[in-house]
Image (cartoon, rainbow, N blue to C red):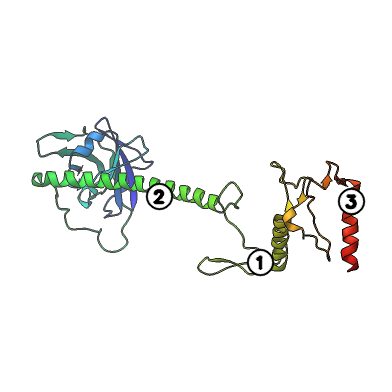
């Protein structure tokens, strides 16, 4: 199918192809593509009329809206056989009448021409049944609806393509962000390392302890308990380090007996301890000699 392009500008039909010639007796292999410059044409059921010196054929066409172009709509129509059986110019007219009686039509113009065919070797020139005139005023509203539907489909397709493109771009960005490695400040992907395992359901489990053992953990707990029960301790509030003021708790020391060493408490009367830890006796010589004598006596019994 060879396409000859026509322009409808300021309601005039103008040729817009290198060749606007058609070989006589051609059948069904030439068409026209019509581009419209004004949206007013979308408001009508439009027909195209091809006319030679002897024949006139009118056909209904469907307009489709065009996006991102200096033209607002386009339509296609096959050139009828009746106007191609004689040499000469072919007039083309676009017109439309709506249900309210408004009528739009292009100026007279002959953008196409028919030239003689070459010699036919065998048989007669091809022929075809006459083209049926499809124009009927009764279905004007139906044709207008077809035009609107075609324009809507074209617009919707463009919007859908843009939406799909935007969604694909957004998904690509989202997927790329999810493929980034996780950090301490942001979410991301992680890789299961040594001592860990992950099931098909995504459950993460520890398979090996890479830090201290359970025995070492128990030893640390025992040391902490020992420090708590046996020492009075203080820690630096900033660093958490142990201060040098640790002291053994008196409650942790054994009491002295006659047969075993241990902690004793001076009575503060006969025996005293000064601030330097020096222990001394406060009894008189007479009392001291009496106590010694009594102790010796009891030990000799």
Instruction: Name the residue beneath numbered marker 1.
Output: 195
SS for callout 3: helix
Between label 2 and label 1, give the one nearer the viewer.
Answer: 1
**Which badge, 3 or 1, comes first in the chain's sequence?**
1
Return the residue at label 3.
Answer: 288
Q: Residue at x 26, y 45 (%)?
A: 152
The residue identified by callout 2 is 164
Q: Give the CA separation, mark 2 to mark 3.
A: 110 Å
The front one of 273 and 117 is 273
Could you say which is closer to the camera, residue 101 or residue 115?
101
| Circle 1 SS class | loop
For label 2, the SS is helix
Evaluate if marks 2 and 1 touch, with contact meaning CB atoms under 8 Å apart.
no
Q: Quadrant of the C terminus?
A: bottom right
Q: CA distance from mark 2 to mark 1?
A: 44 Å
Contact between marks 2 and 3 (CB within 8 A): the answer is no
Q: Earlier in the sequence, mark 2 or mark 3?
A: 2
The answer to whether one can see residue 11 in this image is: yes
Q: Is residue 137 left or right of residue 93?
A: left
In the image, residue 175 lies at what x, y percent?
51, 52
Nearer-N-terminus badge (2/1): 2
> 110 or 243: which is nearer to us?
243
User: Is label 2 or label 3 in front?
Assistant: 3
| Front residue of this view, candidates 201 and 239 | 239
Q: Residues within 10 Å of mark 1 (few under 14, many from 20)?
A: few
Q: Residue at x 30, y 64 (%)?
A: 122
Left or right of 44, for residue 261: right
Expressed as whole percent of the image width and height from the top left, the position of residue 213 reads: 71, 66
Q: Neighbour class for label 2 at 10 Å: few (<14), some, many (≥20)?
A: few
Asked whether the residues under the numbered discs 3 and 1 touch, taking CB atoms below 8 Å apart as contact, a structural biologist would say no
């Amino acid at each position: 199918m060879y396409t000859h392009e026509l322009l409808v500008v300021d309601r005039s039909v103008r040729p817009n192809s290198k060749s606007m010639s058609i070989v006589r007796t051609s059948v069904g292999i030439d068409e026209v593509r019509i581009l419209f410059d004004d949206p007013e044409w979308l408001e009508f059921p439009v027909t195209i009329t091809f006319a030679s010196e002897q024949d006139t054929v009118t056909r209904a066409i469907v307009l489709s809206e065009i996006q991102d172009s200096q033209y607002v709509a386009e339509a296609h129509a096959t050139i009828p056989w009746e106007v191609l059986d004689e040499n000469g110019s072919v007039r083309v007219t676009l017109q439309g009448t709506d249900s309210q009686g408004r009528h739009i039509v292009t100026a007279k113009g002959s953008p196409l021409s028919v030239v003689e065919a070459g010699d036919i070797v065998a048989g007669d020139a091809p022929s075809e049944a006459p083209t049926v005139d499809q124009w009927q005023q009764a279905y004007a509203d139906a044709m207008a609806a077809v035009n609107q539907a075609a324009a809507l489909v074209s617009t919707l397709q463009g919007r859908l393509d843009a939406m799909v493109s935007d969604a694909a771009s957004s998904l690509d960005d989202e997927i790329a962000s999810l493929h980034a490695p996780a950090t301490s400040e942001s979410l991301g992907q992680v890789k299961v390392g040594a001592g860990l395992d992950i099931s098909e359901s995504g459950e993460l489990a520890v398979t090996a302890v890479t830090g201290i053992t359970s025995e070492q953990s128990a030893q640390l707990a025992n040391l902490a308990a020992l420090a708590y029960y046996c020492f009075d301790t203080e820690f630096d509030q900033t660093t958490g380090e142990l201060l040098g003021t640790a002291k053994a708790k008196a409650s942790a020391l054994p009491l002295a007996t006659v047969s075993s060493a241990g902690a004793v408490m001076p009575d503060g009367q006969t025996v005293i301890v000064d601030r330097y830890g020096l222990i001394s006796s406060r009894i008189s010589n007479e009392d001291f000699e009496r106590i010694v004598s009594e102790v010796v006596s009891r030990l000799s019994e």
